[in-house]
Protein backbone atom coordinates (compact mmCIF):
# COMPACT_ATOMS: atom_id res chain seq x y z
CA UNK A 1 0.00 0.00 0.00
CA UNK A 2 1.42 3.35 -1.04
CA UNK A 3 1.75 6.05 1.60
CA UNK A 4 0.31 9.48 0.76
CA UNK A 5 2.94 12.15 0.20
CA UNK A 6 1.50 15.30 1.76
CA UNK A 7 3.70 18.38 1.57
CA UNK A 8 3.13 22.04 2.18
CA UNK A 9 4.86 24.45 -0.16
CA UNK A 10 8.17 25.50 1.37
CA UNK A 11 7.20 29.18 1.44
CA UNK A 12 4.07 28.36 3.44
CA UNK A 13 5.97 26.14 5.88
CA UNK A 14 8.58 28.85 6.43
CA UNK A 15 5.86 31.48 6.88
CA UNK A 16 4.13 29.31 9.50
CA UNK A 17 7.40 28.68 11.34
CA UNK A 18 8.47 32.32 11.38
CA UNK A 19 4.97 33.58 12.19
CA UNK A 20 4.51 31.06 15.00
CA UNK A 21 7.93 31.77 16.51
CA UNK A 22 7.75 35.56 16.36
CA UNK A 23 4.10 35.47 17.38
CA UNK A 24 4.94 33.46 20.49
CA UNK A 25 7.77 35.85 21.40
CA UNK A 26 5.53 38.91 20.98
CA UNK A 27 2.61 37.28 22.80
CA UNK A 28 4.75 36.28 25.79
CA UNK A 29 6.36 39.72 26.05
CA UNK A 30 3.03 41.54 25.79
CA UNK A 31 1.05 39.27 28.09
CA UNK A 32 3.63 38.73 30.80
CA UNK A 33 5.16 42.18 30.50
CA UNK A 34 2.07 44.39 30.44
CA UNK A 35 -1.31 42.70 30.14
CA UNK A 36 -1.32 40.17 32.98
CA UNK A 37 -2.58 41.98 36.10
CA UNK A 38 -1.63 39.23 38.54
CA UNK A 39 1.99 38.17 38.81
CA UNK A 40 3.07 35.23 40.94
CA UNK A 41 6.79 35.61 40.22
CA UNK A 42 8.83 38.66 39.17
CA UNK A 43 8.25 39.65 35.57
CA UNK A 44 11.92 39.40 34.62
CA UNK A 45 12.19 35.80 35.80
CA UNK A 46 8.95 34.79 34.10
CA UNK A 47 9.97 36.42 30.82
CA UNK A 48 13.42 34.84 30.96
CA UNK A 49 12.06 31.34 31.54
CA UNK A 50 9.35 31.63 28.90
CA UNK A 51 11.49 33.26 26.19
CA UNK A 52 14.79 31.36 26.49
CA UNK A 53 13.80 28.30 24.42
CA UNK A 54 12.28 30.49 21.71
CA UNK A 55 15.22 32.86 21.45
CA UNK A 56 17.43 29.80 21.00
CA UNK A 57 15.55 29.12 17.74
CA UNK A 58 15.35 32.59 16.17
CA UNK A 59 18.63 32.59 14.23
CA UNK A 60 18.16 29.09 12.83
CA UNK A 61 14.52 29.54 11.82
CA UNK A 62 15.18 32.89 10.15
CA UNK A 63 18.24 31.42 8.44
CA UNK A 64 16.32 28.40 7.13
CA UNK A 65 18.40 25.71 8.83
CA UNK A 66 16.74 22.26 8.93
CA UNK A 67 18.06 21.31 12.43
CA UNK A 68 16.48 24.47 13.88
CA UNK A 69 13.16 23.48 12.32
CA UNK A 70 13.42 20.04 13.92
CA UNK A 71 14.15 21.63 17.30
CA UNK A 72 11.20 23.96 16.76
CA UNK A 73 8.83 21.00 16.50
CA UNK A 74 10.03 19.70 19.85
CA UNK A 75 9.97 23.06 21.62
CA UNK A 76 6.53 23.90 20.21
CA UNK A 77 5.09 20.90 22.05
CA UNK A 78 6.18 22.48 25.34
CA UNK A 79 4.36 25.69 24.45
CA UNK A 80 1.34 23.71 23.28
CA UNK A 81 1.01 22.10 26.71
CA UNK A 82 1.51 25.48 28.44
CA UNK A 83 -1.12 27.02 26.16
CA UNK A 84 -3.61 24.28 26.97
CA UNK A 85 -2.91 24.80 30.67
CA UNK A 86 -3.61 28.53 30.39
CA UNK A 87 -6.71 27.91 28.25
CA UNK A 88 -8.30 26.23 31.28
CA UNK A 89 -7.07 28.84 33.79
CA UNK A 90 -9.78 31.38 34.66
CA UNK A 91 -8.89 34.86 33.45
CA UNK A 92 -6.09 33.68 31.15
CA UNK A 93 -8.13 31.90 28.47
CA UNK A 94 -7.25 34.32 25.61
CA UNK A 95 -3.54 33.89 26.38
CA UNK A 96 -3.95 30.13 26.35
CA UNK A 97 -5.88 30.05 23.09
CA UNK A 98 -3.38 32.32 21.33
CA UNK A 99 -0.40 30.39 22.67
CA UNK A 100 -1.95 27.10 21.57
CA UNK A 101 -2.65 28.44 18.07
CA UNK A 102 0.83 29.92 17.64
CA UNK A 103 2.53 26.78 18.92
CA UNK A 104 0.57 24.67 16.42
CA UNK A 105 1.70 27.07 13.68
CA UNK A 106 5.30 26.69 14.85
CA UNK A 107 4.97 22.90 14.93
CA UNK A 108 3.53 22.63 11.42
CA UNK A 109 6.01 25.14 10.02
CA UNK A 110 8.91 23.41 11.72
CA UNK A 111 7.85 19.95 10.60
CA UNK A 112 7.17 20.76 6.97
CA UNK A 113 10.04 23.25 6.84
CA UNK A 114 12.53 20.64 8.02
CA UNK A 115 11.11 18.19 5.50
CA UNK A 116 11.29 20.68 2.62
CA UNK A 117 14.66 22.18 3.52
CA UNK A 118 16.16 18.75 4.09
CA UNK A 119 15.21 17.61 0.61
CA UNK A 120 16.68 20.80 -0.87
CA UNK A 121 20.02 20.21 0.81
CA UNK A 122 20.21 16.54 -0.13
CA UNK A 123 19.45 17.22 -3.81
Image (cartoon, grey):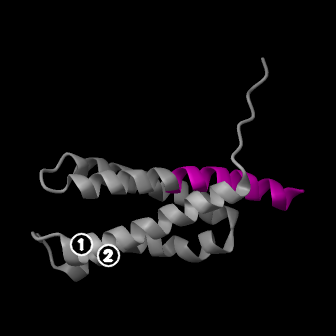
In reply to whether residue 20 is colored magenta, the answer given is: no
Give left or right: position of 115 versus 24. Answer: right
**Which residue in the structure is indicated by mark 2?**
29
- The quadrant in which the C terminus is found is bottom right
Circle 1 Cα neighbour tier, 10 Å, few/some/many (<14 / 14–19 / ≥20) = some
Q: Nearer the viewer, residue 15 or 64?
A: 15
Q: Quadrant of residue 3?
A: top right
**Which residue in the structure is indicated by mark 1?**
32
Q: Nearer the viewer, residue 85 or 97?
A: 97
Q: Is residue 64 above or below residue 3?
A: below
Q: Mark 2: which secondary structure?
A: helix
Magenta region, main secondary structure = helix
Q: Residue at x 51, y 57 (%)?
A: 106
In reply to whether residue 118 is colored magenta, the answer given is: yes
Q: Nearer the viewer, residue 105 or 121?
A: 105
Q: Residue at x 32, y 75 (%)?
A: 29
Report the magenta residues as a range: 106-123
Amino acid sequence: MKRPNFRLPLWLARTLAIGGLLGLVILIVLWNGWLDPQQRVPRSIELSIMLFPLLFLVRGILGGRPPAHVHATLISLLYLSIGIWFAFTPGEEPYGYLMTTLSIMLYLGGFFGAKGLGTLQSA
